[in-house]
Image (tube, coloured by chain):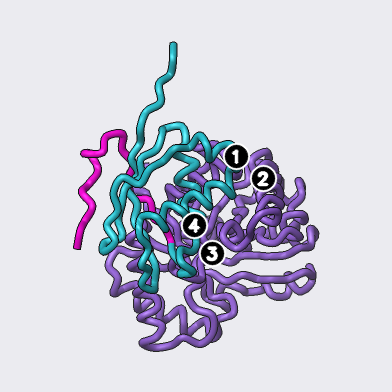
Protein backbone atom coordinates (compact mmCIF):
# COMPACT_ATOMS: atom_id res chain seq x y z
CA UNK A 1 0.00 0.00 0.00
CA UNK A 2 1.37 3.39 -0.96
CA UNK A 3 1.35 5.89 1.87
CA UNK A 4 0.31 9.31 0.67
CA UNK A 5 1.72 12.47 2.14
CA UNK A 6 -0.87 14.58 3.88
CA UNK A 7 -0.86 18.28 4.58
CA UNK A 8 -0.74 19.69 8.08
CA UNK A 9 -1.51 23.28 9.02
CA UNK A 10 0.27 24.72 12.05
CA UNK A 11 -1.14 27.87 13.64
CA UNK A 12 1.58 29.93 15.34
CA UNK A 13 1.99 33.21 17.17
CA UNK A 14 5.09 35.38 17.33
CA UNK A 15 5.89 36.63 20.82
CA UNK A 16 8.42 39.29 21.75
CA UNK A 17 8.82 41.83 24.52
CA UNK A 18 9.95 44.51 22.06
CA UNK A 19 8.09 45.41 18.87
CA UNK A 20 9.26 43.29 15.96
CA UNK A 21 8.39 44.34 12.42
CA UNK A 22 8.99 41.05 10.68
CA UNK A 23 7.17 40.41 7.42
CA UNK A 24 6.43 36.99 5.94
CA UNK A 25 9.72 36.88 4.03
CA UNK A 26 11.88 37.55 7.10
CA UNK A 27 9.89 35.04 9.09
CA UNK A 28 10.29 32.38 6.39
CA UNK A 29 14.04 33.07 6.23
CA UNK A 30 14.38 32.62 9.99
CA UNK A 31 12.49 29.31 9.86
CA UNK A 32 14.53 27.98 6.92
CA UNK A 33 17.79 29.01 8.57
CA UNK A 34 16.88 27.22 11.81
CA UNK A 35 15.61 24.13 9.97
CA UNK A 36 18.79 24.03 7.91
CA UNK A 37 21.05 24.30 10.94
CA UNK A 38 19.15 21.59 12.82
CA UNK A 39 18.47 19.02 10.11
CA UNK A 40 20.88 19.88 7.29
CA UNK A 41 20.47 20.75 3.65
CA UNK A 42 19.30 17.33 2.47
CA UNK A 43 16.26 17.33 4.72
CA UNK A 44 15.62 21.03 4.08
CA UNK A 45 15.35 20.29 0.38
CA UNK A 46 12.56 17.80 1.02
CA UNK A 47 10.75 19.75 3.73
CA UNK A 48 8.58 21.97 1.57
CA UNK A 49 6.68 24.09 4.04
CA UNK A 50 4.84 27.26 3.20
CA UNK A 51 3.53 30.20 5.24
CA UNK A 52 -0.06 30.36 4.00
CA UNK A 53 -1.13 33.38 6.00
CA UNK A 54 0.43 35.79 8.47
CA UNK A 55 -1.01 38.89 10.07
CA UNK A 56 1.73 41.37 10.99
CA UNK A 57 -0.42 43.18 13.57
CA UNK A 58 -1.69 40.22 15.55
CA UNK A 59 1.54 38.29 14.74
CA UNK A 60 -0.44 35.14 14.08
CA UNK A 61 -0.13 32.93 11.05
CA UNK A 62 -0.34 29.46 9.57
CA UNK A 63 2.33 27.23 8.05
CA UNK A 64 1.44 24.38 5.71
CA UNK A 65 3.73 21.37 5.72
CA UNK A 66 3.77 17.66 5.07
CA UNK A 67 2.78 15.37 7.96
CA UNK A 68 6.21 13.73 7.70
CA UNK A 69 8.06 16.92 8.65
CA UNK A 70 5.57 18.29 11.18
CA UNK A 71 7.65 17.48 14.27
CA UNK A 72 10.81 18.78 12.65
CA UNK A 73 9.06 22.04 11.79
CA UNK A 74 7.74 22.44 15.35
CA UNK A 75 11.25 21.78 16.74
CA UNK A 76 12.67 24.42 14.40
CA UNK A 77 10.00 26.95 15.39
CA UNK A 78 10.74 26.22 19.06
CA UNK A 79 14.46 26.91 18.70
CA UNK A 80 14.16 30.23 16.84
CA UNK A 81 15.38 32.92 19.23
CA UNK A 82 15.87 36.07 17.13
CA UNK A 83 14.37 37.75 14.10
CA UNK A 84 15.94 41.03 12.90
CA UNK A 85 18.16 40.96 16.01
CA UNK A 86 15.13 41.10 18.28
CA UNK A 87 14.55 38.26 20.73
CA UNK A 88 11.38 36.40 19.84
CA UNK A 89 9.57 33.16 20.56
CA UNK A 90 7.34 31.37 18.10
CA UNK A 91 4.53 29.65 19.98
CA UNK A 92 2.72 26.86 18.19
CA UNK A 93 -0.97 27.02 19.02
CA UNK A 94 -2.74 24.30 17.10
CA UNK A 95 -2.27 21.80 14.29
CA UNK A 96 -4.92 20.55 11.91
CA UNK A 97 -5.14 18.59 8.69
CA UNK A 98 -7.86 20.92 7.45
CA UNK A 99 -7.11 24.63 7.17
CA UNK A 100 -10.71 25.68 7.79
CA UNK A 101 -10.76 23.89 11.14
CA UNK A 102 -8.15 26.22 12.58
CA UNK A 103 -9.48 29.31 14.32
CA UNK A 104 -9.27 32.35 12.02
CA UNK A 105 -6.17 34.54 12.32
CA UNK A 106 -7.13 37.48 14.51
CA UNK A 107 -6.53 40.65 12.54
CA UNK A 108 -6.41 43.68 14.84
CA UNK B 1 -4.54 12.42 32.88
CA UNK B 2 -7.78 14.44 32.80
CA UNK B 3 -7.58 17.55 34.97
CA UNK B 4 -3.82 17.30 35.49
CA UNK B 5 -2.33 20.76 36.09
CA UNK B 6 0.54 21.60 33.75
CA UNK B 7 3.42 22.99 35.79
CA UNK B 8 6.60 24.62 34.48
CA UNK B 9 9.31 23.32 36.80
CA UNK B 10 11.80 26.18 36.68
CA UNK B 11 11.79 29.84 35.77
CA UNK B 12 14.31 32.47 36.87
CA UNK B 13 12.30 35.69 36.68
CA UNK B 14 14.54 37.90 38.79
CA UNK B 15 18.20 38.01 39.60
CA UNK B 16 18.92 40.41 42.43
CA UNK B 17 16.77 42.63 44.57
CA UNK B 18 13.38 43.04 42.91
CA UNK B 19 10.93 44.05 45.64
CA UNK B 20 7.49 45.55 46.10
CA UNK B 21 5.72 46.72 42.93
CA UNK B 22 8.64 45.80 40.65
CA UNK B 23 8.43 42.20 41.85
CA UNK B 24 4.63 42.19 41.46
CA UNK B 25 4.84 43.55 37.89
CA UNK B 26 7.55 41.07 37.00
CA UNK B 27 5.58 38.08 38.28
CA UNK B 28 2.35 39.34 36.68
CA UNK B 29 4.09 39.39 33.27
CA UNK B 30 5.41 35.86 33.81
CA UNK B 31 1.99 34.61 34.88
CA UNK B 32 0.38 36.14 31.78
CA UNK B 33 3.00 34.57 29.52
CA UNK B 34 2.75 31.17 31.25
CA UNK B 35 -1.04 31.21 30.95
CA UNK B 36 -0.81 32.12 27.26
CA UNK B 37 1.31 29.03 26.57
CA UNK B 38 -0.94 26.76 28.58
CA UNK B 39 0.60 26.42 32.04
CA UNK B 40 -1.43 26.24 35.25
CA UNK B 41 1.51 27.06 37.49
CA UNK B 42 5.26 27.45 37.71
CA UNK B 43 8.15 27.02 40.11
CA UNK B 44 10.22 30.15 40.68
CA UNK B 45 13.94 29.53 41.21
CA UNK B 46 15.09 31.84 44.00
CA UNK B 47 18.79 30.97 43.78
CA UNK B 48 20.84 34.15 44.05
CA UNK B 49 17.88 36.39 44.78
CA UNK B 50 18.21 37.39 48.42
CA UNK B 51 16.39 37.80 50.76
CA UNK B 52 14.53 34.58 50.03
CA UNK B 53 11.98 34.72 52.88
CA UNK B 54 10.69 38.14 51.79
CA UNK B 55 10.39 36.94 48.19
CA UNK B 56 8.50 33.80 49.24
CA UNK B 57 6.03 35.90 51.25
CA UNK B 58 5.56 38.27 48.30
CA UNK B 59 5.03 35.33 45.91
CA UNK B 60 2.44 33.75 48.25
CA UNK B 61 0.60 37.08 48.31
CA UNK B 62 0.72 37.35 44.48
CA UNK B 63 -0.44 33.72 44.13
CA UNK B 64 -3.55 34.45 46.21
CA UNK B 65 -4.44 37.28 43.78
CA UNK B 66 -3.91 35.14 40.67
CA UNK B 67 -6.89 32.84 41.14
CA UNK B 68 -6.21 29.24 40.21
CA UNK B 69 -2.63 29.83 39.00
CA UNK B 70 -0.11 28.08 41.28
CA UNK B 71 3.27 29.56 42.19
CA UNK B 72 5.87 27.36 43.90
CA UNK B 73 9.43 28.16 44.92
CA UNK B 74 12.73 26.33 44.67
CA UNK B 75 16.36 26.84 45.59
CA UNK B 76 19.37 25.25 43.95
CA UNK B 77 22.34 24.18 46.06
CA UNK B 78 25.54 24.39 44.02
CA UNK B 79 28.16 22.38 45.93
CA UNK B 80 31.12 20.21 45.02
CA UNK B 81 31.98 18.94 48.50
CA UNK B 82 29.98 16.28 50.33
CA UNK B 83 30.65 17.75 53.79
CA UNK B 84 29.37 21.15 52.66
CA UNK B 85 26.25 19.48 51.33
CA UNK B 86 25.66 17.61 54.61
CA UNK B 87 26.03 20.85 56.55
CA UNK B 88 23.69 22.81 54.34
CA UNK B 89 21.03 20.10 54.34
CA UNK B 90 20.47 20.26 58.10
CA UNK B 91 17.03 21.70 58.72
CA UNK B 92 17.00 22.99 55.15
CA UNK B 93 13.29 23.33 54.56
CA UNK B 94 12.67 25.42 57.67
CA UNK B 95 15.79 27.46 56.96
CA UNK B 96 14.89 28.26 53.37
CA UNK B 97 11.11 27.86 53.33
CA UNK B 98 11.09 26.79 49.67
CA UNK B 99 8.87 24.05 48.24
CA UNK B 100 11.55 22.29 46.20
CA UNK B 101 15.26 21.78 46.90
CA UNK B 102 17.55 21.14 43.94
CA UNK B 103 21.18 20.03 43.81
CA UNK B 104 23.77 20.89 41.19
CA UNK B 105 27.25 19.38 41.29
CA UNK B 106 29.98 18.06 39.04
CA UNK B 107 31.21 15.67 41.74
CA UNK B 108 29.74 12.12 41.45
CA UNK B 109 30.13 11.60 45.24
CA UNK B 110 27.99 14.63 45.97
CA UNK B 111 25.40 13.52 43.41
CA UNK B 112 25.40 10.04 44.97
CA UNK B 113 24.75 11.50 48.41
CA UNK B 114 22.06 13.85 47.05
CA UNK B 115 20.30 11.08 45.12
CA UNK B 116 19.69 8.99 48.23
CA UNK B 117 18.78 11.89 50.53
CA UNK B 118 15.05 12.54 50.60
CA UNK B 119 15.62 16.22 51.41
CA UNK B 120 16.85 16.71 47.86
CA UNK B 121 14.01 16.71 45.35
CA UNK B 122 15.89 17.33 42.11
CA UNK B 123 19.34 16.70 40.70
CA UNK B 124 19.96 19.23 37.96
CA UNK B 125 22.31 18.40 35.09
CA UNK B 126 23.24 21.44 33.06
CA UNK B 127 26.92 21.72 32.16
CA UNK B 128 28.90 18.95 30.40
CA UNK B 129 30.81 18.29 33.67
CA UNK B 130 27.54 17.74 35.55
CA UNK B 131 26.25 15.46 32.80
CA UNK B 132 29.49 13.45 32.98
CA UNK B 133 29.19 13.16 36.77
CA UNK B 134 25.78 11.54 36.38
CA UNK B 135 26.79 7.89 36.65
CA UNK B 136 24.85 4.63 36.66
CA UNK B 137 25.05 4.55 40.48
CA UNK B 138 23.53 8.01 40.81
CA UNK B 139 20.76 7.10 38.37
CA UNK B 140 20.03 3.90 40.26
CA UNK B 141 19.84 5.67 43.65
CA UNK B 142 17.65 8.41 42.18
CA UNK B 143 15.35 5.75 40.75
CA UNK B 144 15.05 3.99 44.11
CA UNK B 145 14.55 7.15 46.17
CA UNK B 146 12.24 8.94 43.71
CA UNK B 147 14.66 11.85 43.22
CA UNK B 148 13.96 13.71 39.99
CA UNK B 149 16.63 14.22 37.34
CA UNK B 150 16.29 17.58 35.63
CA UNK B 151 17.56 18.70 32.25
CA UNK B 152 17.21 22.39 31.38
CA UNK B 153 15.90 23.52 28.00
CA UNK B 154 17.94 26.72 27.84
CA UNK B 155 21.21 25.16 26.51
CA UNK B 156 19.34 24.43 23.27
CA UNK B 157 18.94 28.19 22.73
CA UNK B 158 22.28 29.29 24.06
CA UNK B 159 24.48 26.85 22.15
CA UNK B 160 25.00 26.54 18.42
CA UNK B 161 26.59 24.05 16.05
CA UNK B 162 29.18 21.73 17.59
CA UNK B 163 28.49 22.76 21.21
CA UNK B 164 24.81 22.01 20.73
CA UNK B 165 25.68 18.61 19.24
CA UNK B 166 27.92 17.84 22.22
CA UNK B 167 25.17 18.87 24.64
CA UNK B 168 22.60 16.72 22.80
CA UNK B 169 25.00 13.74 22.91
CA UNK B 170 25.65 14.13 26.66
CA UNK B 171 21.96 14.70 27.42
CA UNK B 172 21.05 11.60 25.40
CA UNK B 173 23.40 9.51 27.53
CA UNK B 174 21.91 10.91 30.75
CA UNK B 175 18.38 10.18 29.53
CA UNK B 176 19.32 6.61 28.62
CA UNK B 177 20.84 6.04 32.08
CA UNK B 178 17.86 7.58 33.86
CA UNK B 179 15.32 5.52 31.90
CA UNK B 180 17.29 2.30 32.42
CA UNK B 181 17.26 2.86 36.19
CA UNK B 182 13.65 4.14 36.31
CA UNK B 183 14.64 7.59 37.55
CA UNK B 184 11.98 10.20 36.89
CA UNK B 185 12.95 12.99 34.53
CA UNK B 186 12.07 16.68 34.36
CA UNK B 187 12.64 18.99 31.40
CA UNK B 188 12.55 22.58 32.64
CA UNK B 189 12.54 25.77 30.63
CA UNK B 190 14.89 27.42 33.15
CA UNK B 191 13.85 30.63 31.43
CA UNK B 192 15.26 33.95 32.58
CA UNK B 193 13.43 35.83 29.82
CA UNK B 194 9.81 35.58 28.76
CA UNK B 195 10.75 34.47 25.24
CA UNK B 196 12.50 31.40 26.64
CA UNK B 197 9.28 29.98 28.08
CA UNK B 198 7.90 27.34 25.71
CA UNK B 199 4.71 25.33 25.80
CA UNK B 200 4.64 21.65 26.76
CA UNK B 201 3.88 20.50 23.21
CA UNK B 202 6.99 22.21 21.83
CA UNK B 203 9.14 20.78 24.61
CA UNK B 204 7.71 17.30 24.01
CA UNK B 205 8.62 17.52 20.31
CA UNK B 206 12.19 18.57 21.16
CA UNK B 207 12.51 15.70 23.65
CA UNK B 208 11.17 13.22 21.15
CA UNK B 209 13.05 14.43 18.11
CA UNK B 210 16.38 15.73 19.41
CA UNK B 211 16.81 13.69 22.59
CA UNK B 212 15.27 10.45 21.25
CA UNK B 213 12.79 10.11 24.10
CA UNK B 214 9.64 8.14 23.33
CA UNK B 215 6.43 10.20 23.08
CA UNK B 216 4.93 8.53 26.16
CA UNK B 217 8.00 9.17 28.33
CA UNK B 218 8.17 12.75 27.02
CA UNK B 219 4.55 13.35 28.06
CA UNK B 220 5.24 11.86 31.50
CA UNK B 221 8.34 14.06 31.82
CA UNK B 222 6.38 17.19 31.01
CA UNK B 223 2.98 16.54 32.58
CA UNK B 224 2.97 13.77 35.17
CA UNK B 225 6.38 14.26 36.81
CA UNK B 226 6.03 18.02 37.50
CA UNK B 227 2.64 17.35 39.15
CA UNK B 228 4.27 14.63 41.28
CA UNK B 229 7.14 16.97 42.16
CA UNK B 230 4.92 19.71 43.58
CA UNK B 231 2.90 17.07 45.44
CA UNK B 232 6.06 15.58 46.98
CA UNK B 233 6.40 17.81 50.10
CA UNK B 234 2.75 17.15 50.96
CA UNK B 235 3.20 13.38 50.47
CA UNK B 236 6.35 13.45 52.61
CA UNK B 237 4.55 15.41 55.35
CA UNK B 238 1.68 12.93 55.33
CA UNK B 239 4.16 10.06 55.74
CA UNK B 240 5.85 11.79 58.70
CA UNK B 241 2.50 12.61 60.36
CA UNK B 242 1.44 8.99 59.79
CA UNK B 243 4.62 7.70 61.49
CA UNK B 244 4.10 10.02 64.50
CA UNK B 245 0.49 8.86 64.87
CA UNK B 246 1.59 5.22 64.82
CA UNK B 247 4.17 5.83 67.57
CA UNK B 248 1.60 7.59 69.72
CA UNK B 249 -0.81 4.69 69.30
CA UNK B 250 1.88 2.21 70.35
CA UNK B 251 2.74 4.31 73.45
CA UNK B 252 -0.93 4.37 74.46
Q: Quadrant of residue B106?
A: bottom right
Q: What distance separates the C-alpha of mark 4 from that of mark 3?
A: 17 Å
Dot 2 crowding, Cα within 10 Å, few <14, some 14–19, many 20+ = some
Q: Colour of chain B?
A: purple
Q: Are marks 2 and 4 in contact (CB under 8 Å)?
A: no
Dot 3 crowding, Cα within 10 Å, few <14, some 14–19, many 20+ = many
User: Any idea which chain is the cyan one in this picture?
Assistant: A
A96 inside magenta stretch: yes
Q: What distance separates the C-alpha of mark 3 from that of mark 1?
A: 21 Å
Q: Which residue lies under the disc numbered 3?
A: B190
Q: Is residue B213 left or right of residue B125?
A: left
Task: Name the chain letter of the residue that bears numbered label 3.
Answer: B
User: Where in the figure is residue B20, as x and y percent of width and height?
Assistant: 39, 88
Q: Residue at x 51, y 43 (%)?
A: B218
Residue B212 — which label? 1
Count all numbered tags in the image, as a single digit. 4
Q: Are marks 1 and 2 in contact (CB under 8 Å)?
A: yes
Residue extending farthest to the top is A1
Query: Is the residue at mark 2 from the same chain as the one at mark 4?
Result: no
A52 inside magenta stretch: no
Q: What distance separates the C-alpha of mark 2 from that of mark 4?
A: 22 Å
Q: Which residue lies under the disc numbered 4?
A: A80
Q: What distance separates the C-alpha of mark 1 from that of mark 4?
A: 20 Å
Q: Which residue lies under the disc numbered 2?
A: B172
Per the image, label 2 sits on a secondary structure element best described as helix
Query: Is the residue at mark 3 from the same chain as the one at mark 1?
Result: yes
Q: What distance separates the C-alpha of mark 3 from that of mark 2?
A: 19 Å
Q: Which is closer to the viewer, label 4 or label 3?
A: 4
User: Where in the figure is residue B22, as x and y percent of width and height?
Assistant: 39, 86
Per the image, label 4 sits on a secondary structure element best described as loop
Q: Which residues are magenta?
A: A89-108
User: Where in the figure is residue A75, as x and y percent of width and height?
Assistant: 49, 47
Amino acid sequence: MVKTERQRYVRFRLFSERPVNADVKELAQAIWRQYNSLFGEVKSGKAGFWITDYDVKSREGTIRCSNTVLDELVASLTLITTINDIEVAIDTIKTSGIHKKLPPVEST
Amino acid sequence: MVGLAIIETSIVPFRGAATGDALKDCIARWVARARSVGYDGFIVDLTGSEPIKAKIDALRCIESQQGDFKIYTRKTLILDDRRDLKASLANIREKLGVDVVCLKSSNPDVLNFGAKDSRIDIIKLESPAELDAFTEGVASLAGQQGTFIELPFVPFFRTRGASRSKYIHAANKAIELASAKHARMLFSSDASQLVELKNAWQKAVVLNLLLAMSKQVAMDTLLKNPAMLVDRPRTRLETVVGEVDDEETEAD
